[in-house]
Amino acid sequence: MAGLNDSVAVLKGVGTKRQVALNKLGINTINDLLTYFPRRYDDLSIKDPSSAVDGQKVTVKGLVIAPPMLTYFGRKRSRLVFRLRINDQIYTVSFFNQPWLKREIQPNSELIVFGTYNRARNQIQGMKILNAQTSNAFDSIYPANKEVKQATIKSLVKLAYETYHDQIVDIIPASLRAKYRLESFSDTIRNIHFPESPKAAQRAFRTAKFMEFFLFAMKVQILKAAHRKQDPQAEINYQESVVTKFQENLPFKLTAAQQKVIQEILADLSRPIQMNRLLQGDVGSGKTVVAATAILATISANKQAAIMAPTEILAEQHANNFAKMFAGLPVNIALLTGDTSAAARKAMLPSIQTGEVDLVVGTHALFQADVQYADLGLAVIDEQHRFGVNQRQALRQKGTSTNMLAMTATPIPRTLAITMYGDMDVSVINQLPSGRKPIKTTWITASKTNAAVRFVKKQLDSGNQVYVVTPLIEESEAVDMKNAVAIFERFKAIFEPQYQVGLLHGQMSNQEKDATMLQFKNNQFQVLVATTVIEVGVDVANANTMLIFDADHFGLAQLHQLRGRVGRGATQAYCILIADPTNEIGKERMKAVASSTNGFFLSQKDLELRGQGDITGQKQSGMPDFKVADPVGDLNILTVANQEAQRITAEKHWKTKPENVQLAKYLQFSQTINYD
Ligand code: ADP
Ligand code: MG
């Protein structure tokens, strides 16, 4: 029997060649075709240009008042011009590169033209000529290409709908459709392809968006349930006394928030289920010691742990920190990064494989093919948003029943919490260690740079240290470096010999970077000029001021992270953003960072101001691709769809409930989530 999963090749007019071309557009089945939605609708209802908006498209009807003029420029380019009288006004209409239209333009006959209206010139730049019988007032415009034309898609969609519309079943349970006043799927498809009005299309899109989010959320919930499977190997029988003693010996008292998340993590570890937890805590909230507790618990149960960081500097800092924290304990630590020498690596790998090494600290090198673990009980991923989904999985798959703890300082806006991390449990450290003062942030324009330099001088005079962050030009590390060097020279000229100035950039070797960082930490120089390589993790308590050049080139979350490098001690910390944003959005972004120290707010704001296009554009971000819905703009629909998916899957026998049968059947055949 024919069905929606039939190949498009069954349609009349689709031969092998056309089938291949359609496949390239992602259209393989009838279902794909029916859900290949228009990009926009052209309003073909006839209007008087005087009521049209300047620069917008409009459909007009008028009388051709003189023969058209056709001019060629070279062989291919041409311009066809004629005059049209509409309600006693004369308009000039021009068509570019469509010389064949000349035949259709007869003096003293009526003509309907669709095109862009230019008020100042009283002109219409024509796009197409319509005949009087055009049935729909709204023309669906599909993404098309050279091989598959607009008209072809349109007629195939029509044919597919006519042949198959009886078979379009409703996947969304009836109770949900009633509750949210959603259309049936069949109506949705009809109203999106052949709307009676833009409003009708809009209503149909609302259903389509809900459906897209809802099905996504259902898949996430199913995935989450799959992770929750009993797995005796995943259980970590840690020694409580080891953990308690470790906490007692810390040089500070854990905050209540730290204690709470540690409890959540330890409870997870002691269950025979793989942990899949995201630890979210603002910069400086003290995630490292939380990770250390989980790591130590794992090792006390005779299993291995690994912690992966995005940069060499950070991995080394972690290795040093853990060595200090675990001093006196029987914990054998190895540092494995891209920088580890071949000889050291060769010596290290066997001891990781035999289990002699308890904790492996490193970068991406941790999941290389030849790195094998004896029994990886816990994988910690620091600054996890810097890694792709696949990289996080690659590390996890180094063990058979590995528990995963992903950490991030980027507060996760609700949009991403649902879309990207929906299958994880979330712990939040919502409190900074006591005694920290909020960082004071100001935004100034480049013309005020001298005042900022005077402020820096004042801070240096009081014995504080200062970071100067140089412009970010994403395309080229070499250009970043050149900029950094220029600013470095400038600050040297201003402050030396009274104060020393250091330089840190991405093209330095890791030894050089580390040496520089260490010198800064030891106050051997007081000003550190750096590219964003200081962005994550590195800790210098005496630095209280940060100057950021061209701050508008950074993401808001990134600025928030950057300034988190200061304000780690008890002195008041300052951040000065130097930026001359060229548009309103840019100004709004700078004001947002200056006025808020709430990372959560800033991340959501960043998403809103950038829009979805930009997020999905960043491949490594792991944001799933939605066809019709926008997880930022349609956050409300997303939230509701997610709640409903959670509610449904929380019921034990949801799959066999009559109203869910179609849903369950659909999900059974599409288990995977496409990130990318
Ligand atoms: P982040 O969450 O940004 O990774 P870190 O773990 O690096 O933060 O901690 C920031 C600093 O705060 C470190 O120097 C750490 O030793 C210190 N710290 C962590 N927890 C506490 C606490 N409860 N009280 C005081 N200082 C703490
Ligand atoms: Mg950290």
Image: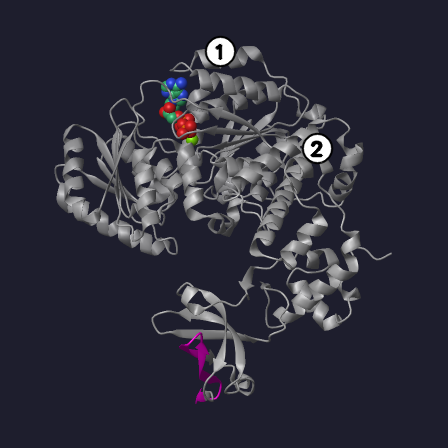
Query: Image height check: is 431 above or below 583?
Result: above
Give the x, y percent position of residue 216.
64, 41
Seen from this angle, which residue lies furthest right? 1
Looking at the image, can residue 328 be seen? no
User: Which of the four quarters of the rendered structure image does ligand 1 lie in?
Assistant: top left
Left/right of residue 150 with respect to residue 281 in the rendered view = right
Give the x, y percent position of residue 154.
66, 66
Q: Can you identify the residue that label 1 sits on?
A: 245
Residue at the (26%, 29%) spot, across then down: 573
Q: Main secondary structure of the magenta part?
A: strand
Disc 1 within 8 angstroms of ligand 1 (CB): no
What is the quadrant of residue 661 in the picture? top right
The front one of 514 and 255 is 255
Left/right of residue 17 with respect to residue 60 in the rendered view = right
Left/right of residue 21 with respect to residue 625 in the rendered view = right
The stretch in magenta equals 70-93
* Type of amino acid under label 2: Ala
Seen from this angle, which residue lies furthest front? 88
Residue at the (69%, 51%) spot, across then down: 187
Left/right of residue 403 with respect to residue 99 in the rendered view = right
Tag 1 and tag 2, C-beta contact below 8 Å: no
Secondary structure of the residue carrying numbered label 1: helix
